Amino acid sequence: MTRKSLGFVPLIWQCAYCSTQNPGPIKSCTKCGAPQPEDVEFLQIDEERFNFIKDEALIRMAKAGPDIHCPFCGTRNLSTAEVCKKCGGDLSWDGKERPTGQRVRTVAEAQAPQTPVPQAPAKPSRKVSPILLVIILAVIAGCVILLVMLLRTDDLTATVSAVQWERSIAIEAYTSITDSDWWDEVPDSAQVTGCSTVYRFTSAEPRVNATEVCGEPYVVDTGTGVGEVVQDCTYEVYDDYCEYTMMAWVVVETVTDSGRDLAPAWPALDLGPDQREGARSETYVINFRNESESYRYTTSSVQLFLQAEVGSRWTLEVNQLGGVQSIEPYN
């Protein structure tokens, strides 16, 4: 988000001793002479409109930076000062800059009585009964035990009862496709058929082809007794979104073969003009039997599958839900 400056407006401060309202840049009360306090609050004069300053000297002062309070006598000095105008102290020795950037209140807001926020009556504390506490702890302990059991695995011996396999090959054709994307993402080989300007993203900084979206203006403290009118702005960036056509390899068919033996084979292909073989995939399933229990293991490793002769014995790593985590021939 960008803070956009619209100009500068005069501020005032109220004397803590005689309540006189003084111009912001004046460093002592115009009526009683009391110094402006270090923690003074500057206020916006007109809450209905902004009375923008035309005085170039005041504008330069506001842009120069926040005033500095002398570390020796506390006197407020301009940001360009090197020594205190009152005591002559060196301001570079831990001189304190006034805080800047905070939102400035209006005179009306500062004078409005503060309405106390009603406090909700304190709710009486409820003591957890010992029985309920025991039940909660028991439930937590049960969940922990269940989790440990589910994560635990056991090794057992089982016999291969059946096998099955499936192999697939995608067939791709070189053909014309229609797609769409942002203009700078369109492939070089594509033929653009049409574009429209649409919203793409929001930027915190100004961008080309961006629409500025700003909030309501408000005044911030420059630390000089002069306020700066600003707006918080973002930038909605619009860009060309285009439709295009191009030649590309696309999957038009998938040929599959399967069986229930240890002789997996790839399906035969009958490729037409402008067609080619695409991606291959293979899945192997081994079924086991251990006394009265059955187990199923799926893998993509043909080397492991070819060892799974029906009747051969294997060691299975099985979790508490009956899922087979790994297998290896029994030695």
Image (tube, rainbow, N blue to C red):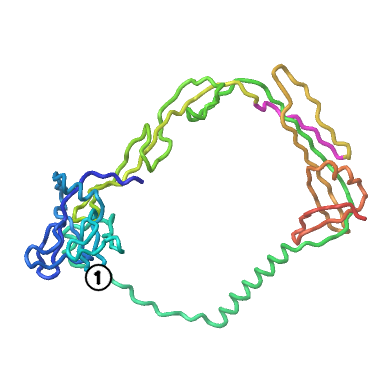
**Can you tell which quarter of the image residue 110 is in?**
bottom left
Magenta residue span: 250-260
Badge 1: residue crowd in 10 Å (few <14, some 14–19, many ≥20): few
Of residues 51 and 326, the one drawn nearer to the viewer in this rendering: 51
Residue 12 pos. (x, y %) = 15, 58
Which residue is pictured at 37% across the width and 32% down the height?
A: 208
- The amino acid at mark 1 is Pro
* Residue extending furthest toward the bottom: 130
Q: Is residue 275 above or below residue 314?
A: above
Residue 204 pos. (x, y %) = 38, 43
Does 21 sit left or right of 292 as displayed? left
* Residue extending furthest toward the left: 31
Does 101 sit left or right of 51 as displayed? right
SS of the residue under disc 1: loop
Magenta-drawn stretch, dominant element (helix, strand or loop): strand
Q: Which residue is mark 1?
A: 116
Which residue is pictured at 57% across the width and 81% down the height?
A: 131
